[in-house]
Image (spheres, rainbow, N blue to C red):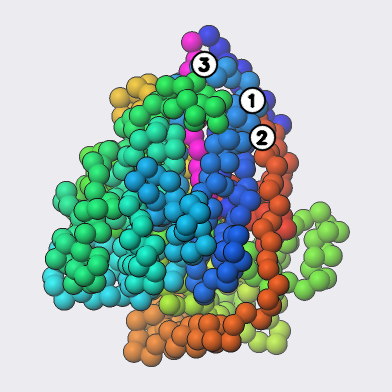
Amino acid sequence: MTETSPARDGDTYVVGVDFGTLSGRAVVVRVRDGEILASAVHEYAHAVIEERLPGSGEQLPPDWALQHPEDWRDVLRTAVPAALAASGVDAGAVVGIATDFTACTVLPTLADGRPLAETELWAGRPHAWPKLWKHHAAQGQADRINDLAHARGEKWIHRYGGKISAEWQYAKALQVLEEDPQVYAACERWIEAADWIVWQLAGAESRNTCTAGYKGIHQDGAYPTEDYLAALNPGFADFAATRLEHPLTPLGARAGSLTAQAAAWTGLPEGVAVAVGNVDAHVAAPAARAVENGQLLAIMGTSTCHVVNGAALADVPGICGVVDGGIIAGSYGYEAGQSAVGDIFAWWLRQGVPAHYQLEADTTGEDLHELLTRKAAGQSVGGHGLIALDWMNGNRSTLVDHHLSGVIIGITLTTRPEEIYRALLEATAYGTRTIVEAFEEGGVPVTEFVVTGGLKKNALLMQIYADVLRRPVSLAVSEQGPALGSAIHAAVAAGAYPDVRTASAAMGRVQRGAYLPDAARADAYDALFAEYRLLHDHFGTGPDKQLHRLRAIRNTALTSSGPQDDAPSTAPPRAAVSATPTGTGPSGAVPTGAAPASAAPAIDGFPKSEV
């Protein structure tokens, strides 16, 4: 048990809140040294809305992923006061609060910020609801956005590796316009959840440079032109001017002051500093002391986001984007990512583990992740004869194609569950190596590989990454990287530090070189990575679009045959908030964004929300 660090005279504190895919986490942090005194988690009552719309029960099409705004407010009402109470800190000593969010999670609202999903008129329309980052049903719109941008020679397209993702603002908004123009017409503001939650805290709209740059195609001081948007769809011409345009605020700046209403929700003093919003991946860099050029931070959870600063502007094919000051002022912030990592491992535990494995785990006191990890660790590199593609949720980088799907080859009648499990661990490492090589080939040096997020707890996975990448793996010390990163930004917004880099040096923590590559294993992985690239190129860039055809066949079958079960689904019960001083929770506590116990097996480190 880790004891709560007592407050002392003169100490001040900040609150960081990390909004993940399935839950939100609040931490109370001491400003002078970054010590996390306590944390609390609130699991979203509605989780990810993928099958039926709340209220009406309308079945959603394939590849949809929505969320409920009230779940996010509940984090402020429950997790923040619970963390504050567990910390023992006097609320009067708290000087600021900051938040981060999965991105691109975006929603349509009225001019006053009220979500369309919460209005009587629009609550029954699916397109009125917030679209989670993993909503991938706008791939067709994304393809048109990219094709037109290249045909017209739009300069900004190369800042995004040549492709705008289906996950981002424009593709999702264009889908709303084309599939439900009435909802689109009613939408007065199209806003990232990262900015919307700050609106709830400070009482006024603000927009941050991070989400605007990476997800909103804001480059060189402007959004895409009305002429370009009209060429996509005449009704889309004024999208940026009417629904996005707003002064942008740099990261670490003060967006406003906590309103009386938000103070009542959180238990914090009215008027304390509210920092501008941020993305969960980018905000974690200061917490891991990964703010210098070349230090690549991998935020590893349900998905993985890779962020790295560079001294110069470069066009790197297939990355998510590059934004001046997108991570920290004075550098170009680059982003890439994988759309599924922890989600892949959790999927295999749901689908591929026989009952006697669960019995063995129960007997030994392990969970399934620990059991499979132990069994897989004893095998030599390549001993399973398998290669997998890590595309179970599409490919975010470097192919930027969410019509792709996963592949496993080499299976025989003697293949065991732990061998497939290890092949899936390795597949995600190969995907990361593909991204690292793309950065370096594109002129962005990677001098250090740092990991944060729940998956860093799996020693086998971290060693595989060190061996596959042929470089040391450093680990962020904090178990709540994004939440601590938000707290660091809150300290800057409150005036406790002059800038984020200075605050990072005082409040961030990292263990350098925690895992070192083994030369013999690295040689073996080089041979396997070559096979991965052959498979990657065949299914990802080759002329045979078999994976695209299979997805089209699936979607047609799902939408034409109708639901197989007409019984309405029910939302999971509202989970109680868990609040503990840091380190005192149960060893099996579900991390921020992890699946509840009734869903996929989720143990220490598996899975953690990302991006």
On the question of residue 186 being in view, the answer is yes
Viewer-nearest residue: 161 or 413? 161
Which three-letter amino acid code belongs to the residue tagged 2? Ala
- The residue nearer to you, when weighing 95 against 604, is 95
The answer to whether 292 is drawn above or below residue 268 in the figure is below
Q: Residues within 10 Å of mark 1 (few under 14, many from 20)?
A: many
Q: Quadrant of the N terminus?
A: top right
2 or 3: tag closer to the N-terminus: 3
Along the horizontal axis of the image, is 425 left or right of 544? Answer: right
SS of the residue under disc 2: strand
Q: Which residue is mark 1?
A: 85
Horizontal side of residue 283 vs 327, given as left or right: right
Kindly report the distance in space between the C-alpha atoms of the residues bearing marks 2 and 3: 20 Å
Q: Which element carries disc 3, helix, strand or loop?
A: helix
Residue 140 in percent (x, y) is at: 35, 76
Q: CA distance from mark 2 to mark 1?
A: 8 Å
- Earlier in the chain: of badge 2 and badge 1, it is 1
Disc 3 residue type (three-letter): Gly
| Image disc number at residue 579 | 2
- Residue, disc 3: 92
Q: In this view, which residue lies farthest toward the front?
A: 121
The residue positioned 43% from the left and 84% from the top of the image is 548
Magenta span covers which residues? Answer: 10-21
